[in-house]
Structure formats: structure tokens, C-alpha cells
Amino acid sequence: MNDKSIREAMALLKLNASRDIILEKFDNETFELAKARIKGKEKHPKADKLFMLLDDLRWATPYEVAEYRAKRLSCNKIADLGCGVGFQSFSFAKHCKSVVAVDIDRRKIEFAKLNAEALGIKNIEFIEGDILSKKVADKLKDADAFFCDPERLPSETARTIKTMRPDIEKLLKLYPKICIEFPPMIKNIPFECEKEYLSLNGELNRLNLYFSELRKCRASAVVLPQGAVIRASVVRNIIAEEQKAPKIMDFFYEVDPAVEKAELTAELLLTMKNAYVYEQDNDIYLTSGKLLKNDFVKAYKVLEVVEDDFDKILEALQRQKAGKVVLRMTVSPKDYWTERNKYERSLLGDKEVHLFVFDRAVIAEKL
Ligand SMILES: C[S@@+](CC[C@H](N)C(=O)[O-])C[C@H]1O[C@@H](n2cnc3c(N)ncnc32)[C@H](O)[C@@H]1O
């Protein structure tokens, strides 16, 4: 494995050279490492120096998430249990005095060591071993906090606790003061812990479970890269009748998916005076007569609300001088452009509007 060869293979990939041409010059491992470095930019700002395969990258923690988590778990000595090629460990190394990074997979530990060297990180001790073994647990006794991002089966359609590796029950017994990353779509979390949902660039990205002293509340929601946090202070997420909007007002807000998953809408309302809940088909929106700024919502200005009827919607779009219509109702991806073109071919304006269809159609402009 030669860094110079990987760089040369990357240069050829960037020139769109075919696989066969690259493999005439370099071995398959170099080709795979070069591909991962190019794709890795999405997850780490210095991915072009790192050693990983595409599969390692798939499971690696994105930089913004790793940084947020490391700041929250900042302590003297942290143990990263199942560190993979090290993306999360590198952020721990920045925010904790020292890190012990463990993985059962020899190749990953070797890559993680090379990566730490490439990044100039010196405060990580790497251990190859099984985190559920007594031998490893004994070595980690003096850590102040533990973190684990378990392995999941790539093929499974619904995420379950049983298929995660290492075994979660055993992990909790050995390391009670732990934060565990869980798939955010998992249903039923049968543990007494804080559930922290994170969104990255508006999309639900991660779920962190904090146990014992690491737990701060029932649930929390975090939006990244902004870093804004809401923590549950109210016991239940109940929306009072007077907080429900009878109709859509001048401004309309999409709620960040992390808030919805963490069931923190009632908490969000505490921070948004004059906002009301508009619930449609289990989706929660907010509406207000005022323009409100908040990291947990995307704001729209309502231009018109009309009956859900094609001709009436088209007339309203023409009145609003719309040219592009972003469809915000459920449309299958294969029909999306056919449906969108039905409106756009009769429009001459230059404004981009968003069309939400509930029991009424809402034409709105993103702010
Ligand atoms: C999802 S990956 C971790 C990715 C990592 N957080 C990152 O940011 O790159 C899970 C890792 O857990 C490791 N693993 C699974 N069971 C383990 C065990 N019993 N002991 C040590 N490592 C284990 C796997 O080898 C794998 O590298």
C-alpha cells in the first residue's frame, strides 16, 4: 500500500479513466483505496489522506457528527469500542485528553493507525481485540466514558437490536457509562436512556443513546452543522388544543426530522412564541402570522391557499407568477417529473414555489 500510488490512481479517476486502464498500472487494493478517498470527501475534510475501503466509509461517522459527539462526551479518557478505521476516534482525540480505540478487525485497526499517523494524531492507543472479552474490558477500566457504534447487517431492511454487533445487552453490562449509536429508524428502544436524534443538513442522520451518568434528559434533538440542541424538559409531548392551528397562516414551517423523531414538538413550541401546530396525516408542521427564526424549522411564506383541484391550483400558480413548482406531496419518484411538468408547462413566471397538498393546496415560497 503506497500513498503515492493511491494519489496517482485518484488523479486518473478524476480524469474519468476506466477501471481497466487504472488496473493496468495499479493493483486492485490501490484502486479501491483511491475510490474511497474520492468519495470520502463527503464524510471527512481530510479524506484524501486516509486509508479506507468504500465499505468502511459507508459505516464511518460523518465529520460534523463525530465532532458534535466528541464535544458532548469530552473527558479525560474515552474508549471508542469498535472504532473501525477511526473517524469517530479522531474527533475524540481532539476533544479528550486520550483515547483508546478498539476493533476486532485487524485490517481496520491497521488502517485506523495509518489514518491517525496521516492526521498527525498522537493521543490514541489502538487495541485489536473483542470488546466483550475480559482481556479488553480489563484494559479499559480507567476510562471515564465509553462510546460504541455497533456493526449492523448491510442487507437487513428493518433495523433490529438483535442483529447488531457487539451484543447490546452484554455491552451495557460491561460498560454502563456509555453512549451507543443506534440506527435512527429503529422502532422500540427498550432501554432507560436519553435518545438524542441528530439531523445533518435537514436529513435525519443519527441516533445516540446515552446511559447512566451520560444521560441528561428523556430525549433531545440536534441540528447539524448549526449545532442547535433542544432537550426535553416537559414529561410528555402533548400539544394543547390552543396550540393547534385551525388554518394555515401567513408563514408555514417544516419541522426538522430530529425534533419529530425525538417527540419534542411541544418543547420546540416553548421556544417559538406565536407558532401553532398544523398536523396533517401524521406529519407535523407549524404555522404563524409572524416570521419566526429557529434552527429547527424551515420557513416558507404562504402565497395562496386554494382548493385541492388541478385547475384551481394552476390558476393560483399563474397568479403568483410561478415558473418552477417543487412538489411537496407524496408522489412516487418515477412519476415526479411527469406530475411536475403538468403544472410547469403552462407557467411563464420565474418564481420557484413549493406546492404542499393537504386537504387544501398551499403554494409557498421558501425563505
Ligand atoms: C459501524 S463500525 C464503526 C465505525 C466507526 N465509528 C467510524 O466512525 O469509522 C463498527 C465496528 O465495530 C467492530 N466490532 C463489532 N463487534 C466488535 C467486537 N465484539 N469487538 C470489537 N469490535 C467490534 C467492527 O469490526 C466495526 O469496525
Image (cartoon, rainbow, N blue to C red):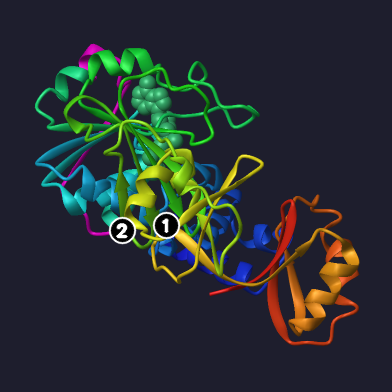
Task: Please name the amino acid that badge 2 sits on.
Answer: Ala
Closest to the observer: 1 or 204?
204
Left or right of residue 37: residue 317: right
Q: Residue at 38% x, 51% y: name it.
A: 269
The image quarter containing residue 10 is: bottom right
Q: Is residue 108 visible?
A: no
Residue receiving disc 1: 296
Please name which of the two marks, 2 or 1, marks the residue nearer to the observer. 1
Q: Which mark is residue 118?
A: 2
Q: Amino acid at mark 1?
A: Phe
Secondary element at image label 1 = loop
Is 366 rendered above or below residue 44?
A: below
Residue 197 on image: x %, y %: 41, 42
Q: Position of residue 49 (x, y in %)?
A: 39, 62
Does residue 363 appear to the left or right of 151 in the view shown?
right
Question: In this picture, is 186 found above or below 263?
Answer: above
Magenta-tinted stretch: 119-136
Q: Magenta stretch: residue 128 in it?
A: yes
Image region (quadrant) for ligand 1? top left
- Direction from residue 283 to residue 214 in the image, left or right: left
Q: Residues within 10 Å of mark 2 (few under 14, many from 20)?
A: few
Q: Position of residue 176 (x, y in %)?
A: 22, 20
251 in relation to 242, above or below: below
Q: Quadrant of residue 283 in the image?
A: top right
x and y, in percent, of residue 241 in the image: 48, 41
Which residue is pictured at 48% across the width and 20% down the height? 161
**Label 1 packing within 10 angstroms: few (<14), some (14-19), many (20+):** many
Mark before the other along the chain sequence, 2 or 1: 2
